[in-house]
Image (tube, grey):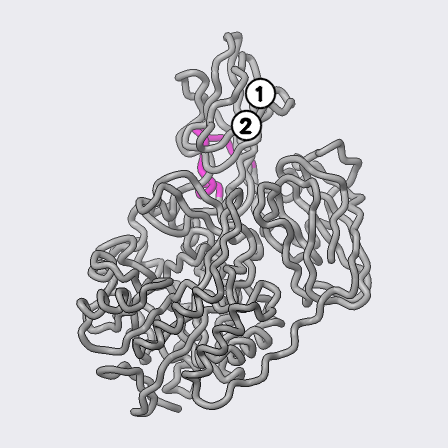
Protein backbone atom coordinates (compact mmCIF):
# COMPACT_ATOMS: atom_id res chain seq x y z
CA UNK A 1 0.00 0.00 0.00
CA UNK A 2 1.08 3.56 -0.68
CA UNK A 3 -0.07 7.12 -0.20
CA UNK A 4 -0.62 9.26 -3.28
CA UNK A 5 -1.27 12.93 -2.62
CA UNK A 6 -1.43 16.31 -4.30
CA UNK A 7 1.45 18.33 -2.83
CA UNK A 8 2.19 22.04 -2.90
CA UNK A 9 4.17 21.75 -6.12
CA UNK A 10 4.20 18.07 -7.12
CA UNK A 11 2.30 14.85 -6.99
CA UNK A 12 3.78 12.70 -4.23
CA UNK A 13 3.94 8.99 -3.49
CA UNK A 14 4.85 8.30 0.12
CA UNK A 15 6.27 11.83 0.29
CA UNK A 16 8.42 11.43 -2.84
CA UNK A 17 7.74 13.78 -5.80
CA UNK A 18 6.55 11.97 -8.95
CA UNK A 19 5.63 13.09 -12.44
CA UNK A 20 2.62 11.38 -13.99
CA UNK A 21 3.31 10.24 -17.54
CA UNK A 22 -0.11 8.91 -18.44
CA UNK A 23 -1.96 7.77 -21.53
CA UNK A 24 -5.66 7.36 -22.27
CA UNK A 25 -6.83 3.86 -23.19
CA UNK A 26 -10.54 3.05 -22.93
CA UNK A 27 -11.13 -0.52 -21.78
CA UNK A 28 -14.49 -0.50 -23.61
CA UNK A 29 -12.84 0.28 -26.96
CA UNK A 30 -10.36 -2.59 -26.80
CA UNK A 31 -11.22 -6.30 -26.84
CA UNK A 32 -10.57 -7.64 -23.35
CA UNK A 33 -8.15 -10.29 -24.58
CA UNK A 34 -6.01 -7.46 -26.00
CA UNK A 35 -5.87 -5.31 -22.85
CA UNK A 36 -2.58 -6.79 -21.67
CA UNK A 37 -0.82 -6.13 -24.98
CA UNK A 38 -2.05 -2.54 -25.23
CA UNK A 39 -1.08 -1.79 -21.63
CA UNK A 40 2.42 -3.19 -22.23
CA UNK A 41 2.64 -0.89 -25.25
CA UNK A 42 1.92 2.08 -22.98
CA UNK A 43 4.71 1.02 -20.64
CA UNK A 44 7.09 0.60 -23.57
CA UNK A 45 6.30 4.12 -24.79
CA UNK A 46 7.53 5.45 -21.46
CA UNK A 47 4.29 5.88 -19.50
CA UNK A 48 3.78 5.05 -15.83
CA UNK A 49 0.00 5.55 -15.75
CA UNK A 50 -3.12 4.80 -17.80
CA UNK A 51 -6.38 6.79 -17.83
CA UNK A 52 -9.85 5.53 -18.69
CA UNK A 53 -13.42 6.79 -18.77
CA UNK A 54 -16.41 4.66 -17.72
CA UNK A 55 -19.48 4.84 -20.02
CA UNK A 56 -22.64 4.64 -17.94
CA UNK A 57 -24.91 3.77 -20.88
CA UNK A 58 -22.82 0.74 -21.83
CA UNK A 59 -23.22 -0.76 -18.37
CA UNK A 60 -26.84 0.25 -17.66
CA UNK A 61 -28.74 -0.01 -20.98
CA UNK A 62 -32.07 0.01 -19.11
CA UNK A 63 -32.89 1.42 -15.67
CA UNK A 64 -31.62 -0.93 -12.98
CA UNK A 65 -30.13 -3.44 -15.47
CA UNK A 66 -26.43 -3.13 -14.65
CA UNK A 67 -24.29 -5.26 -16.98
CA UNK A 68 -20.71 -6.39 -16.34
CA UNK A 69 -19.58 -3.46 -14.24
CA UNK A 70 -16.92 -5.91 -13.06
CA UNK A 71 -15.15 -5.23 -16.37
CA UNK A 72 -13.92 -1.98 -14.81
CA UNK A 73 -12.28 -3.92 -12.00
CA UNK A 74 -10.75 -6.43 -14.39
CA UNK A 75 -9.20 -3.60 -16.40
CA UNK A 76 -7.78 -1.96 -13.28
CA UNK A 77 -6.25 -5.30 -12.29
CA UNK A 78 -4.74 -5.68 -15.77
CA UNK A 79 -3.22 -2.21 -15.52
CA UNK A 80 -1.66 -3.01 -12.16
CA UNK A 81 -0.23 -6.23 -13.55
CA UNK A 82 1.34 -4.18 -16.37
CA UNK A 83 2.99 -1.91 -13.79
CA UNK A 84 0.80 1.15 -14.36
CA UNK A 85 -1.04 3.50 -12.04
CA UNK A 86 -4.60 4.36 -13.10
CA UNK A 87 -6.60 7.58 -13.34
CA UNK A 88 -10.35 6.87 -13.42
CA UNK A 89 -12.85 9.28 -14.97
CA UNK A 90 -16.28 7.86 -14.04
CA UNK A 91 -18.37 10.76 -15.32
CA UNK A 92 -21.34 10.48 -15.08
CA UNK A 93 -20.84 12.42 -18.34
CA UNK A 94 -17.67 11.47 -20.26
CA UNK A 95 -17.91 13.00 -23.80
CA UNK A 96 -15.26 10.69 -25.38
CA UNK A 97 -16.96 10.83 -28.81
CA UNK A 98 -19.24 8.18 -27.28
CA UNK A 99 -23.00 7.85 -27.72
CA UNK A 100 -24.77 10.55 -25.66
CA UNK A 101 -21.51 11.37 -23.87
CA UNK A 102 -22.00 8.17 -21.86
CA UNK A 103 -25.36 9.21 -20.41
CA UNK A 104 -28.17 6.63 -20.77
CA UNK A 105 -30.87 7.43 -23.32
CA UNK A 106 -33.57 6.44 -20.84
CA UNK A 107 -32.34 9.16 -18.46
CA UNK A 108 -31.75 12.01 -20.91
CA UNK A 109 -35.12 11.28 -22.53
CA UNK A 110 -36.80 11.91 -19.18
CA UNK A 111 -34.87 14.84 -17.77
CA UNK A 112 -33.92 16.72 -20.95
CA UNK A 113 -32.08 19.98 -20.25
CA UNK A 114 -31.87 19.13 -16.55
CA UNK A 115 -28.96 16.74 -17.15
CA UNK A 116 -25.64 17.61 -15.53
CA UNK A 117 -27.30 19.77 -12.87
CA UNK A 118 -28.40 19.51 -9.25
CA UNK A 119 -31.85 18.36 -10.49
CA UNK A 120 -33.18 15.78 -8.01
CA UNK A 121 -34.31 13.18 -10.57
CA UNK A 122 -31.03 13.32 -12.49
CA UNK A 123 -28.86 13.26 -9.38
CA UNK A 124 -30.78 10.35 -7.84
CA UNK A 125 -30.01 8.27 -10.94
CA UNK A 126 -26.32 9.24 -10.67
CA UNK A 127 -26.27 8.18 -7.01
CA UNK A 128 -27.71 4.77 -7.88
CA UNK A 129 -25.23 4.27 -10.73
CA UNK A 130 -22.21 5.34 -8.70
CA UNK A 131 -23.35 3.04 -5.92
CA UNK A 132 -23.04 0.13 -8.36
CA UNK A 133 -19.83 1.29 -10.06
CA UNK A 134 -17.57 2.73 -7.40
CA UNK A 135 -16.83 -0.44 -5.40
CA UNK A 136 -14.87 -1.61 -8.46
CA UNK A 137 -12.73 1.53 -8.11
CA UNK A 138 -12.51 2.11 -4.36
CA UNK A 139 -11.39 -1.46 -3.65
CA UNK A 140 -8.45 -0.87 -5.98
CA UNK A 141 -7.20 2.50 -4.71
CA UNK A 142 -3.48 2.86 -4.12
CA UNK A 143 -3.95 3.19 -0.37
CA UNK A 144 -5.50 -0.28 -0.42
CA UNK A 145 -2.74 -1.81 -2.50
CA UNK A 146 -4.32 -1.13 -5.89
CA UNK A 147 -3.34 1.04 -8.87
CA UNK A 148 -5.95 3.84 -8.71
CA UNK A 149 -4.34 7.17 -7.80
CA UNK A 150 -6.92 9.82 -8.84
CA UNK A 151 -10.64 10.06 -9.68
CA UNK A 152 -12.23 12.81 -11.77
CA UNK A 153 -15.27 14.89 -10.79
CA UNK A 154 -17.60 15.08 -13.84
CA UNK A 155 -15.80 15.91 -17.12
CA UNK A 156 -14.96 19.23 -18.77
CA UNK A 157 -17.95 20.70 -16.98
CA UNK A 158 -16.84 24.28 -17.63
CA UNK A 159 -17.50 23.71 -21.35
CA UNK A 160 -21.14 23.00 -20.51
CA UNK A 161 -22.49 24.52 -17.31
CA UNK A 162 -21.97 26.53 -14.16
CA UNK A 163 -23.93 24.62 -11.49
CA UNK A 164 -21.33 24.63 -8.74
CA UNK A 165 -23.78 23.09 -6.27
CA UNK A 166 -23.96 20.07 -8.60
CA UNK A 167 -20.18 19.77 -8.86
CA UNK A 168 -19.77 20.07 -5.09
CA UNK A 169 -22.47 17.46 -4.47
CA UNK A 170 -20.81 15.12 -6.97
CA UNK A 171 -17.41 15.51 -5.28
CA UNK A 172 -19.01 14.88 -1.89
CA UNK A 173 -20.79 11.79 -3.26
CA UNK A 174 -17.51 10.32 -4.49
CA UNK A 175 -15.99 10.76 -1.04
CA UNK A 176 -19.11 9.40 0.65
CA UNK A 177 -18.92 6.27 -1.50
CA UNK A 178 -15.33 5.59 -0.47
CA UNK A 179 -13.00 7.53 -2.76
CA UNK A 180 -9.94 8.36 -0.64
CA UNK A 181 -7.44 9.18 -3.40
CA UNK A 182 -7.30 12.79 -4.69
CA UNK A 183 -10.14 14.14 -6.81
CA UNK A 184 -9.57 16.42 -9.80
CA UNK A 185 -11.38 18.32 -12.53
CA UNK A 186 -10.28 18.94 -16.13
CA UNK A 187 -11.26 21.83 -18.39
CA UNK A 188 -9.99 23.87 -21.30
CA UNK A 189 -7.45 26.58 -20.36
CA UNK A 190 -9.96 29.43 -20.65
CA UNK A 191 -11.25 31.56 -17.81
CA UNK A 192 -14.94 30.74 -18.27
CA UNK A 193 -14.20 27.01 -18.47
CA UNK A 194 -12.00 26.96 -15.39
CA UNK A 195 -14.43 29.07 -13.35
CA UNK A 196 -17.38 26.95 -14.47
CA UNK A 197 -15.77 23.57 -14.06
CA UNK A 198 -13.49 23.70 -11.03
CA UNK A 199 -14.33 22.88 -7.40
CA UNK A 200 -12.70 24.65 -4.42
CA UNK A 201 -10.27 22.33 -2.71
CA UNK A 202 -10.12 19.94 -5.70
CA UNK A 203 -7.13 19.83 -8.07
CA UNK A 204 -7.84 21.60 -11.38
CA UNK A 205 -6.11 20.38 -14.56
CA UNK A 206 -6.17 21.68 -18.13
CA UNK A 207 -6.83 20.11 -21.54
CA UNK A 208 -5.13 21.31 -24.73
CA UNK A 209 -3.14 20.17 -27.75
CA UNK A 210 -0.49 22.90 -27.98
CA UNK A 211 0.81 26.17 -26.45
CA UNK A 212 1.45 24.57 -23.07
CA UNK A 213 3.06 27.64 -21.51
CA UNK A 214 0.03 29.80 -22.28
CA UNK A 215 -2.35 27.10 -21.09
CA UNK A 216 -0.56 26.59 -17.80
CA UNK A 217 -0.31 30.37 -17.28
CA UNK A 218 -4.10 30.57 -17.47
CA UNK A 219 -4.43 27.65 -15.06
CA UNK A 220 -2.03 29.36 -12.64
CA UNK A 221 -4.22 32.47 -12.54
CA UNK A 222 -6.93 30.25 -11.12
CA UNK A 223 -4.76 27.90 -9.06
CA UNK A 224 -1.46 29.51 -7.92
CA UNK A 225 -0.33 26.33 -6.15
CA UNK A 226 -0.45 22.61 -6.80
CA UNK A 227 1.06 20.38 -9.48
CA UNK A 228 0.49 21.28 -13.12
CA UNK A 229 -1.07 18.65 -15.35
CA UNK A 230 -2.40 18.55 -18.89
CA UNK A 231 -5.11 15.94 -18.39
CA UNK A 232 -5.83 15.71 -22.12
CA UNK A 233 -2.90 16.39 -24.42
CA UNK A 234 -4.65 16.06 -27.79
CA UNK A 235 -1.90 14.37 -29.76
CA UNK A 236 -4.34 13.46 -32.55
CA UNK A 237 -8.04 13.88 -33.31
CA UNK A 238 -11.18 11.97 -34.30
CA UNK A 239 -13.01 11.67 -37.64
CA UNK A 240 -16.57 12.37 -38.78
CA UNK A 241 -18.47 10.48 -41.46
CA UNK A 242 -18.39 12.36 -44.75
CA UNK A 243 -15.39 14.51 -43.76
CA UNK A 244 -11.65 14.26 -44.36
CA UNK A 245 -9.46 11.97 -42.27
CA UNK A 246 -7.69 14.02 -39.58
CA UNK A 247 -3.99 13.58 -38.83
CA UNK A 248 -1.42 15.47 -36.79
CA UNK A 249 2.21 15.69 -37.80
CA UNK A 250 4.22 13.40 -35.48
CA UNK A 251 7.08 15.88 -35.11
CA UNK A 252 4.72 18.69 -34.20
CA UNK A 253 3.00 16.50 -31.60
CA UNK A 254 6.35 15.44 -30.11
CA UNK A 255 7.47 19.07 -29.79
CA UNK A 256 4.20 19.96 -28.04
CA UNK A 257 4.70 17.05 -25.63
CA UNK A 258 8.23 18.21 -24.92
CA UNK A 259 6.94 21.70 -24.11
CA UNK A 260 4.50 20.30 -21.53
CA UNK A 261 7.28 18.35 -19.82
CA UNK A 262 9.68 21.31 -19.94
CA UNK A 263 7.11 23.20 -17.85
CA UNK A 264 7.64 20.65 -15.10
CA UNK A 265 4.11 19.35 -15.64
CA UNK A 266 2.54 15.92 -15.71
CA UNK A 267 0.66 14.79 -18.81
CA UNK A 268 -2.00 12.40 -20.04
CA UNK A 269 -1.84 11.59 -23.76
CA UNK A 270 -5.31 11.68 -25.28
CA UNK A 271 -5.34 9.19 -26.86
CA UNK A 272 -2.36 6.91 -26.29
CA UNK A 273 -4.35 4.14 -27.98
CA UNK A 274 -7.83 5.00 -29.22
CA UNK A 275 -9.23 1.63 -30.24
CA UNK A 276 -12.68 1.22 -31.77
CA UNK A 277 -16.25 2.26 -30.95
CA UNK A 278 -17.61 -1.27 -31.32
CA UNK A 279 -21.32 -2.02 -31.12
CA UNK A 280 -22.54 1.18 -32.79
CA UNK A 281 -21.58 3.23 -29.73
CA UNK A 282 -19.88 6.06 -31.64
CA UNK A 283 -21.36 9.44 -30.78
CA UNK A 284 -21.78 12.63 -32.77
CA UNK A 285 -20.95 16.30 -32.57
CA UNK A 286 -22.70 19.42 -33.74
CA UNK A 287 -20.91 21.76 -36.13
CA UNK A 288 -21.39 25.49 -36.15
CA UNK A 289 -18.10 26.56 -34.59
CA UNK A 290 -17.74 27.38 -30.92
CA UNK A 291 -21.50 27.21 -30.27
CA UNK A 292 -21.71 23.50 -31.26
CA UNK A 293 -25.29 24.07 -32.40
CA UNK A 294 -25.00 23.43 -36.12
CA UNK A 295 -25.39 20.39 -38.39
CA UNK A 296 -24.94 16.89 -36.99
CA UNK A 297 -21.43 15.44 -37.49
CA UNK A 298 -21.57 11.71 -36.69
CA UNK A 299 -18.35 10.10 -35.45
CA UNK A 300 -16.88 7.17 -37.39
CA UNK A 301 -16.53 3.71 -35.87
CA UNK A 302 -12.73 3.81 -35.72
CA UNK A 303 -11.33 5.70 -32.76
CA UNK A 304 -7.77 5.40 -34.03
CA UNK A 305 -7.41 9.11 -33.19
CA UNK A 306 -4.10 9.27 -35.08
CA UNK A 307 -2.72 8.05 -31.75
CA UNK A 308 0.86 6.85 -31.20
CA UNK A 309 -0.47 3.28 -30.93
CA UNK A 310 -2.83 2.70 -33.84
CA UNK A 311 -6.18 0.90 -33.95
CA UNK A 312 -4.41 -2.43 -34.57
CA UNK A 313 -2.14 -1.92 -31.56
CA UNK A 314 0.94 -1.17 -33.68
CA UNK A 315 3.54 1.53 -32.92
CA UNK A 316 3.48 4.49 -35.30
CA UNK A 317 6.12 7.13 -36.05
CA UNK A 318 4.47 9.20 -33.31
CA UNK A 319 5.04 6.32 -30.87
CA UNK A 320 8.77 6.26 -31.50
CA UNK A 321 9.11 10.05 -31.22
CA UNK A 322 7.09 10.07 -28.00
CA UNK A 323 9.15 7.18 -26.61
CA UNK A 324 12.28 9.22 -27.22
CA UNK A 325 10.82 12.27 -25.43
CA UNK A 326 9.28 10.33 -22.54
CA UNK A 327 12.40 8.24 -22.06
CA UNK A 328 14.24 11.36 -20.90
CA UNK A 329 11.75 11.77 -18.05
CA UNK A 330 11.20 8.12 -17.12
CA UNK A 331 12.69 6.44 -14.07
CA UNK A 332 15.10 3.86 -15.47
CA UNK A 333 15.30 2.23 -18.89
CA UNK A 334 12.11 1.65 -20.84
CA UNK A 335 10.77 -1.88 -21.42
CA UNK A 336 11.14 -3.53 -24.81
CA UNK A 337 8.29 -2.93 -27.25
CA UNK A 338 5.98 -5.98 -27.36
CA UNK A 339 5.63 -7.97 -30.54
CA UNK A 340 2.80 -6.89 -32.83
CA UNK A 341 -0.41 -8.95 -32.53
CA UNK A 342 -0.98 -11.75 -35.00
CA UNK A 343 -2.79 -10.86 -38.21
CA UNK A 344 -5.08 -12.92 -40.40
CA UNK A 345 -3.02 -15.50 -42.27
CA UNK A 346 -4.47 -14.59 -45.66
CA UNK A 347 -7.37 -12.79 -47.38
CA UNK A 348 -10.80 -14.40 -47.08
CA UNK A 349 -14.06 -13.74 -48.92
CA UNK A 350 -17.41 -14.47 -47.29
CA UNK A 351 -20.40 -15.04 -49.57
CA UNK A 352 -23.61 -13.77 -47.99
CA UNK A 353 -26.16 -16.28 -49.21
CA UNK A 354 -28.88 -15.93 -46.58
CA UNK A 355 -31.10 -12.84 -46.58
CA UNK A 356 -33.97 -11.49 -44.49
CA UNK A 357 -35.62 -8.23 -45.61
CA UNK A 358 -35.63 -5.38 -43.13
CA UNK A 359 -39.38 -5.79 -42.59
CA UNK A 360 -38.82 -9.42 -41.60
CA UNK A 361 -35.97 -8.49 -39.26
CA UNK A 362 -38.18 -5.89 -37.56
CA UNK A 363 -41.03 -8.39 -37.26
CA UNK A 364 -38.79 -10.99 -35.59
CA UNK A 365 -36.41 -8.85 -33.50
CA UNK A 366 -38.17 -5.52 -33.04
CA UNK A 367 -40.08 -4.21 -30.07
CA UNK A 368 -43.88 -4.09 -30.01
CA UNK A 369 -45.68 -1.82 -32.45
CA UNK A 370 -47.60 0.97 -30.74
CA UNK A 371 -49.91 3.74 -31.90
CA UNK A 372 -49.47 7.35 -30.86
CA UNK A 373 -51.20 10.64 -31.56
CA UNK A 374 -47.86 12.04 -32.80
CA UNK A 375 -44.54 10.42 -33.68
CA UNK A 376 -42.77 9.19 -30.53
CA UNK A 377 -39.05 9.68 -30.03
CA UNK A 378 -36.50 6.87 -29.87
CA UNK A 379 -36.31 7.49 -26.14
CA UNK A 380 -40.05 6.96 -25.71
CA UNK A 381 -39.72 3.67 -27.61
CA UNK A 382 -36.63 2.63 -25.59
CA UNK A 383 -34.29 2.55 -28.58
CA UNK A 384 -30.70 3.49 -27.84
CA UNK A 385 -28.90 2.43 -31.04
CA UNK A 386 -30.84 1.28 -34.09
CA UNK A 387 -33.92 2.08 -36.17
CA UNK A 388 -37.57 3.02 -35.80
CA UNK A 389 -40.24 2.42 -38.43
CA UNK A 390 -42.96 5.06 -38.37
CA UNK A 391 -46.17 4.42 -40.33
CA UNK A 392 -48.98 6.90 -40.96
CA UNK A 393 -51.94 7.22 -43.29
CA UNK A 394 -52.41 10.34 -45.39
CA UNK A 395 -56.21 10.58 -45.52
CA UNK A 396 -58.02 11.14 -48.77
CA UNK A 397 -59.16 12.02 -51.19
CA UNK A 398 -56.87 15.06 -51.19
CA UNK A 399 -54.45 16.64 -53.62
CA UNK A 400 -50.69 16.19 -53.44
CA UNK A 401 -48.97 18.25 -50.75
CA UNK A 402 -45.41 18.29 -49.37
CA UNK A 403 -44.70 15.74 -46.65
CA UNK A 404 -42.39 16.97 -43.84
CA UNK A 405 -40.70 15.14 -40.97
CA UNK A 406 -40.17 18.05 -38.58
CA UNK A 407 -37.27 17.85 -36.16
CA UNK A 408 -35.93 14.74 -37.88
CA UNK A 409 -32.91 13.10 -36.24
CA UNK A 410 -31.18 11.73 -38.14
CA UNK A 411 -32.01 10.13 -41.51
CA UNK A 412 -35.25 8.62 -42.86
CA UNK A 413 -35.84 6.42 -45.88
CA UNK A 414 -39.43 7.01 -46.99
CA UNK A 415 -41.84 4.62 -48.70
CA UNK A 416 -45.19 5.68 -50.13
CA UNK A 417 -47.62 2.82 -50.77
CA UNK A 418 -44.69 0.39 -50.64
CA UNK A 419 -42.46 2.22 -53.13
CA UNK A 420 -39.23 3.97 -52.11
CA UNK A 421 -39.92 7.70 -52.43
CA UNK A 422 -36.79 9.39 -51.09
CA UNK A 423 -34.41 10.07 -48.22
CA UNK A 424 -34.97 12.79 -45.63
CA UNK A 425 -32.41 14.37 -43.33
CA UNK A 426 -32.39 17.05 -40.66
CA UNK A 427 -31.27 19.59 -43.26
CA UNK A 428 -33.71 18.35 -45.93
CA UNK A 429 -36.82 17.13 -44.09
CA UNK A 430 -39.34 17.56 -46.96
CA UNK A 431 -40.00 14.76 -49.45
CA UNK A 432 -39.09 15.85 -52.97
CA UNK A 433 -42.32 14.60 -54.57
CA UNK A 434 -45.59 15.75 -52.95
CA UNK A 435 -47.90 13.02 -51.64
CA UNK A 436 -51.60 12.76 -52.49
CA UNK A 437 -54.14 11.03 -50.27
CA UNK A 438 -55.20 8.35 -49.65
CA UNK A 439 -51.67 6.93 -49.08
CA UNK A 440 -49.76 4.79 -46.60
CA UNK A 441 -46.39 6.33 -45.68
CA UNK A 442 -43.55 4.55 -43.91
CA UNK A 443 -40.43 6.31 -42.62
CA UNK A 444 -37.53 4.14 -41.50
CA UNK A 445 -35.54 6.47 -39.25
CA UNK A 446 -31.95 5.69 -38.22
CA UNK A 447 -29.96 7.31 -35.44
CA UNK A 448 -26.43 8.19 -36.55
CA UNK A 449 -25.21 8.65 -32.97
CA UNK A 450 -26.33 10.88 -30.13
CA UNK A 451 -24.51 14.16 -29.52
CA UNK A 452 -21.65 13.73 -27.03
CA UNK A 453 -20.50 17.34 -26.51
CA UNK A 454 -21.97 20.80 -26.14
CA UNK A 455 -25.37 22.29 -25.35
CA UNK A 456 -27.28 19.71 -27.43
CA UNK A 457 -25.96 16.71 -25.53
CA UNK A 458 -28.89 14.47 -24.64
CA UNK A 459 -31.17 15.61 -27.45
CA UNK A 460 -33.77 13.09 -28.59
CA UNK A 461 -33.66 10.97 -31.73
CA UNK A 462 -36.44 10.18 -34.20
CA UNK A 463 -39.16 12.45 -35.57
CA UNK A 464 -39.20 15.01 -32.78
CA UNK A 465 -41.43 17.72 -34.29
CA UNK A 466 -44.22 15.71 -35.90
CA UNK A 467 -45.24 14.59 -39.38
CA UNK A 468 -46.92 17.26 -41.49
CA UNK A 469 -48.84 17.13 -44.77
CA UNK A 470 -48.63 20.71 -46.02
CA UNK A 471 -49.31 22.57 -42.71
CA UNK A 472 -51.52 19.85 -41.20
CA UNK A 473 -50.17 17.43 -38.62
CA UNK A 474 -50.74 13.78 -39.39
CA UNK A 475 -51.98 11.95 -36.31
CA UNK A 476 -52.36 8.28 -35.50
CA UNK A 477 -48.69 7.35 -36.00
CA UNK A 478 -47.70 3.71 -35.56
CA UNK A 479 -44.12 3.09 -34.48
CA UNK A 480 -41.87 0.11 -33.86
CA UNK A 481 -38.24 0.11 -32.77
CA UNK A 482 -35.32 -2.18 -33.59
CA UNK A 483 -32.40 -2.09 -31.15
CA UNK A 484 -28.93 -3.29 -32.13
CA UNK A 485 -28.66 -5.41 -28.99
CA UNK A 486 -31.58 -7.52 -30.29
CA UNK A 487 -29.14 -9.17 -32.74
CA UNK A 488 -28.19 -12.09 -30.52
CA UNK A 489 -26.99 -15.34 -32.15
CA UNK A 490 -30.01 -17.41 -31.09
CA UNK A 491 -32.44 -14.75 -32.31
CA UNK A 492 -30.68 -14.28 -35.65
CA UNK A 493 -30.46 -18.04 -36.20
CA UNK A 494 -34.25 -18.21 -36.19
CA UNK A 495 -34.80 -15.59 -38.89
CA UNK A 496 -36.49 -16.68 -42.13
CA UNK A 497 -34.24 -16.63 -45.17
CA UNK A 498 -34.94 -15.95 -48.82
CA UNK A 499 -33.55 -14.40 -52.00
CA UNK A 500 -32.42 -10.78 -51.92
CA UNK A 501 -33.51 -8.29 -54.53
CA UNK A 502 -30.99 -6.00 -56.17
CA UNK A 503 -29.68 -3.65 -53.45
CA UNK A 504 -32.34 -4.80 -50.99
CA UNK A 505 -32.19 -3.59 -47.41
CA UNK A 506 -32.06 -6.22 -44.71
CA UNK A 507 -29.85 -8.71 -42.89
CA UNK A 508 -27.36 -10.69 -45.00
CA UNK A 509 -25.66 -13.73 -43.49
CA UNK A 510 -22.78 -15.91 -44.54
CA UNK A 511 -19.74 -17.77 -43.32
CA UNK A 512 -16.05 -18.03 -44.07
CA UNK A 513 -13.21 -20.28 -43.00
CA UNK A 514 -10.03 -19.13 -41.30
CA UNK A 515 -6.73 -20.87 -41.00
CA UNK A 516 -4.63 -18.83 -38.62
CA UNK A 517 -6.88 -16.24 -36.85
CA UNK A 518 -5.56 -12.77 -36.22
CA UNK A 519 -6.43 -9.10 -36.57
CA UNK A 520 -8.11 -8.23 -39.87
CA UNK A 521 -9.84 -5.49 -41.84
CA UNK A 522 -13.34 -6.15 -43.17
CA UNK A 523 -14.27 -4.42 -46.43
CA UNK A 524 -17.75 -3.91 -47.93
CA UNK A 525 -17.18 -2.61 -51.44
CA UNK A 526 -20.32 -1.03 -52.88
CA UNK A 527 -22.43 -1.26 -49.72
CA UNK A 528 -24.31 1.78 -48.41
CA UNK A 529 -24.71 2.08 -44.65
CA UNK A 530 -25.27 -0.38 -41.84
CA UNK A 531 -23.68 -2.62 -39.22
CA UNK A 532 -21.56 -5.76 -39.22
CA UNK A 533 -21.27 -8.65 -36.77
CA UNK A 534 -18.61 -11.38 -36.80
CA UNK A 535 -19.39 -14.41 -34.65
CA UNK A 536 -22.03 -12.34 -32.87
CA UNK A 537 -19.60 -9.49 -32.05
CA UNK A 538 -20.76 -6.12 -33.44
CA UNK A 539 -17.85 -4.40 -35.19
CA UNK A 540 -19.84 -1.16 -35.57
CA UNK A 541 -21.23 1.01 -38.35
CA UNK A 542 -19.94 1.17 -41.93
CA UNK A 543 -20.89 3.95 -44.36
CA UNK A 544 -19.87 4.52 -47.95
CA UNK A 545 -19.44 8.29 -47.44
CA UNK A 546 -16.06 7.60 -45.74
CA UNK A 547 -13.44 8.51 -44.72
CA UNK A 548 -13.37 5.11 -42.97
CA UNK A 549 -13.27 2.42 -45.63
CA UNK A 550 -13.02 -0.79 -43.59
CA UNK A 551 -13.85 -2.11 -40.13
CA UNK A 552 -11.31 -3.42 -37.63
CA UNK A 553 -11.80 -7.08 -36.67
CA UNK A 554 -9.97 -7.99 -33.42
CA UNK A 555 -8.12 -11.27 -33.70
CA UNK A 556 -9.82 -12.76 -30.61
CA UNK A 557 -13.21 -12.43 -32.34
CA UNK A 558 -12.14 -14.87 -35.07
CA UNK A 559 -11.75 -18.60 -34.59
CA UNK A 560 -9.99 -21.39 -36.40
CA UNK A 561 -12.32 -22.95 -38.95
CA UNK A 562 -15.81 -21.68 -39.72
CA UNK A 563 -16.81 -18.12 -38.77
CA UNK A 564 -20.15 -16.37 -39.21
CA UNK A 565 -20.75 -12.84 -40.51
CA UNK A 566 -23.94 -10.75 -40.58
CA UNK A 567 -24.42 -7.46 -42.43
CA UNK A 568 -27.43 -5.26 -41.66
CA UNK A 569 -27.81 -2.91 -44.61
CA UNK A 570 -30.11 0.04 -43.92
CA UNK A 571 -29.84 1.87 -47.27
CA UNK A 572 -28.72 0.02 -50.44
CA UNK A 573 -26.76 -3.22 -50.44
CA UNK A 574 -23.79 -4.01 -52.64
CA UNK A 575 -22.77 -7.40 -54.03
CA UNK A 576 -23.58 -10.05 -51.39
CA UNK A 577 -20.05 -10.66 -50.15
CA UNK A 578 -17.48 -9.14 -47.79
CA UNK A 579 -13.73 -9.48 -47.75
CA UNK A 580 -11.36 -9.85 -44.81
CA UNK A 581 -7.67 -9.24 -45.16
Query: Is 101 positioned to the left or the right of 119 in the image?
Result: right
Which of these two is toward me, 175 or 310? 310
Q: Nearer the viewer, residue 435 or 474?
A: 435
**What residue sits right under mark 2 in the picture?**
391
Q: Residue at x 43, y 81 (%)?
A: 85
Find residue 35 and report its horizontal and vertical position in percent. Answer: 57, 73
Instruction: Judge whether residue 117 is colored magenta.
Output: no
Mark 2 or mark 1, earlier in chain: 2
Distance between mark 2 and mark 1 Cα atoms:
7 Å
Callout 1 crowding tier (Cα within 10 Å): few <14, some 14–19, many ≥20: some
Circle 2 packing at 10 Å, graded few (<14), some (14-19), many (20+), is many
Secondary element type, mark 1: strand
Q: Is residue 141 above or below residue 171?
A: below
| Residue 41: quadrant of the picture | bottom right
Q: Is residue 371 magenta?
A: yes
Image: 363 above or below 2: above
Q: Residue at x 20, y 70 (%)?
A: 220
Q: In the image, what residue occupies the spot 43% across and 51% down? A: 100
Say whether residue 136 is left or right of residue 353: left
Query: From which residue to which does the magenta span run?
Result: 369-381
Q: Quadrant of residue 316?
A: bottom right
Q: Position of residue 138 (x, y in %)?
A: 39, 78
User: Of 480 and 116, which appears nearest the observer?
Assistant: 116
> Residue 162: where, in percent of width, then height?
22, 55
| Secondary element type, mark 2 | strand
Q: Which mark is residue 440?
A: 1
Total numbered labels: 2
Amino acid sequence: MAEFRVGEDDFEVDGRPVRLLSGALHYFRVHEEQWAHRLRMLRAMGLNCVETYVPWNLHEPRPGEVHDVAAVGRFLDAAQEAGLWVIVRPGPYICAEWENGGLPHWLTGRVGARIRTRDAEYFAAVERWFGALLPQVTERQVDRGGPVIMVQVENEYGSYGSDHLYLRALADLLVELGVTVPLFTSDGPEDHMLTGGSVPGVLATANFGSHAREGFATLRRHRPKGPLMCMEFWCGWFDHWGADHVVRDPGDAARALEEILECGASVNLYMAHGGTSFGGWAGANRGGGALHDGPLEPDVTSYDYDAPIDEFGRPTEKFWLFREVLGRYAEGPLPEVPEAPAVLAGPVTAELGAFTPLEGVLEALGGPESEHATAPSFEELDVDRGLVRYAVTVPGPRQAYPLRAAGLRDVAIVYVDGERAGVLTEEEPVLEAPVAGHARVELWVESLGRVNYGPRTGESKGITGGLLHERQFLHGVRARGLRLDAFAPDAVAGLPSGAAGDGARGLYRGSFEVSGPGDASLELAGWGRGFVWVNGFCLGRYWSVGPQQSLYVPGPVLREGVNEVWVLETDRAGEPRVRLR
